[in-house]
Every structure is written in C-alpha cells, then in structure tokens.
Image (cartoon, rainbow, N blue to C red):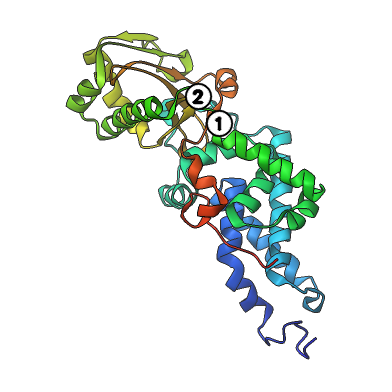
Amino acid sequence: MSGDGFPDGSGVEPAARFEAERGRLRAIAQRMLGSTGEAEDAVQEAWLRLVRTDAAEIDNLPGWLTTVVSRICLDLLRARAARREEPAGEALPEAVSEGTDPEREAVLVDSVGRALLVVLDRLGPAERVAFVLHDGFAVPFEQIAPIVGRTPVAAKKLASRARQRVRGTAALPPEPLAGHRRVVEAFLAAARGGDLAELLAVLAPDVVRRADPAALPPGRALVARGARTVAGETTVFGRRARYGAVALVDGLPGILIAPDGRLRLVLRMAVADGRVAGYEVVADPGRLAALELAVLEPAVLEPAVLGSGVLGSAVLPR
C-alpha cells in the first residue's frame, strides 16, 4: 500500500485514473444499453460512486469500475424491461427520423452496428450483460458471475444462449444465402439513393409489396403490384432507408429500419432469380415481436477476432 492511498503506488489522482478508463467504460455501457445518453449517465454514476469510495480499498480499479458500470447498466435494463418502454413498431414510419440526434446516431451505429443493436435489445438483461462483457470485452466468466448474480458456469450459459440468438439460424445454405443477401443489399442501396433505374433493375417485373396498415399513411393501398409502381413508392421510402440495415429475418436476409437502434419496421424480402420478387413491410408491434432477428455476420462475434468485430475489444486484467 502506498502512502497516497493507492495500492499500486502510482500517485495518480482518482480523477485522472478514472478518465483513463472513461472511453472503455462508455463503450461497455453503450453496447449494454444501446443509448449514448444513458451510457454517459451510467459512466457518470460510476464516477460518483468512486468518489464516495475509499480508493485504498480498491485493488483493481479497471475491474472495479467495469463491475460498477455493468451493475448500473443491468439495473437500467431490468427497469426498462419492467416498464416495457418504447415497444417496437410504436412510431409511425413517417416520423421515425423526428427527435433523432444525427451525431449521436452516427456514434452509436458506428461503434456497435444497427442490426446488432436491435438484436441485443431482444436479449434478457443478464444475457445482454454477460454477452457484451465476454464476447465484446473478453471479461472472464469468474468476473461476470457476481455481476449477474450467477455462478461462472451459469454466466457462461447466459452468454452462450445470447450468442446463439445473435447469430440466429439461416434458412438457406451459405451460397444461396449470400446471393439472397446481395439482392437485398442492392435494393437497400438503391432505396437509400432514391435511384429509380437501380430499383427497377433489382425488382422483378411482377414484384408485389404488402404492408401492415400501421406502416403506411392513411389511404395508401396495402398491396402494390408491378416494378414501376413499387419502385416509385420505394423512392419515397428512401427517406427512411438511411436507418436501414440488412439482417437475418426468420432465417432469410431482410431489412430492419431502426433509428437509434430502436426497431420500427421490418422488410421481409422474397428473392427469386436474382431479383426482389416481393417484400412485406411489418410494423405491427405483435408481428415484429414474433419475428426471429439475427445478425448476418456471425464471424465477427468469435473471440478470436474481437479486435475487428462490431463489438470491439478491451481486455481487462484477470
């Protein structure tokens, strides 16, 4: 024990030591909460708790701060689940961009990934915490266990169950799945750019678009037929396509519309002969909740490639 009250004898003030950890703590909280604002609040609360704690009693500050931030996030996730705040599909598609902070949106999506944010939001609170800590930040299960109130074996099972849900199960073999995905990605790119010619190129001549009533303005037909009609509608949809991400929807590539990572719409895509044969816009909350959603890039979730994965990495002292 050093004379300055810090076990490592560094002589560094608590504020400086905390600031050195802030970026990592923020990254952990963002992935757990899916919100930059809530993540900042969680990190600030961890600082306040550190101020109220005798630093001499903390042997491993990074580990202590990780535990504190994770428990704060777990409490917030449990409270959110109990309140059932912001149910999927609640906002009408015409209003999805309202109230969105573009800068925070970019930070959140760049650091985590839009599809992954949606899928993480479907995990139970303890599953999400265990998965993020282990698969995203290489925290051993011995450290995760007391955070989620489980044994290390049970914590490992939580993360494993979450990992399977994030990966999902494809309904097609790899090669046809990749072809299906390319068509869906081409459709989304054309919709984002409002490019009528590109849309016509990717849509089958007899394409059919169906939609839940909540997905359309009043008076709009629930079914549209023909490439030119559907393409014309889709150029208007392009305003919302910037919030889109390709993901696995019931085992097939589809599109999630999720401003700030909050699911609002799902496009279930049918592909045939290298073109979009049809798509359905799902907006009803009950139907959205029943869809099986997963990330289309399972390789980035492997611990061996954490450094290049969408979760990022930050190895903690063991």
Q: Which residue is mark 1?
A: 168
What residue do we see at 78% from left, 91% from top?
A: 3
Residue 234 picture location, percent across and down: 30, 23
Amino acid at pointer 1 = Gly
Q: Is residue 289 above or below residue 149?
A: above
Which is more toward the observer, 264 or 313?
Answer: 313
Location of residue 84 with respect to 222 vertically, above or below: below
Q: Distance of mark 2 from mark 1, alpha carbons?
A: 7 Å
Q: Where is the C terminus found, in terms of image quarters?
A: bottom right
In the picture, measured across the screen, residue 45 lies left or right of residue 266, that is right
Q: Residues within 10 Å of mark 2 (few under 14, many from 20)?
A: some
The type of residue carrying mark 2 is: Gly
In this picture, residue 282 sits left or right of residue 18: left
* Label 1 SS: loop
Q: Position of residue 119 (x, y in %)?
A: 56, 36
Q: Earlier in the sequence, mark 2 or mark 1?
A: 1
Counting other residues with Cα less than 10 Å from the Cα at mark 1, is it few (<14), some (14-19), or many (20 or more)?
Answer: many
Q: Is residue 39 visible?
A: no
Confirm whether residue 114 shows in the render: yes
Please give left or right for residue 293 compared with residue 187 in the image.
right
Marks 2 and 1 in Cβ contact (< 8 Å): yes
Q: Up-down: is 300 above or below 60? A: above
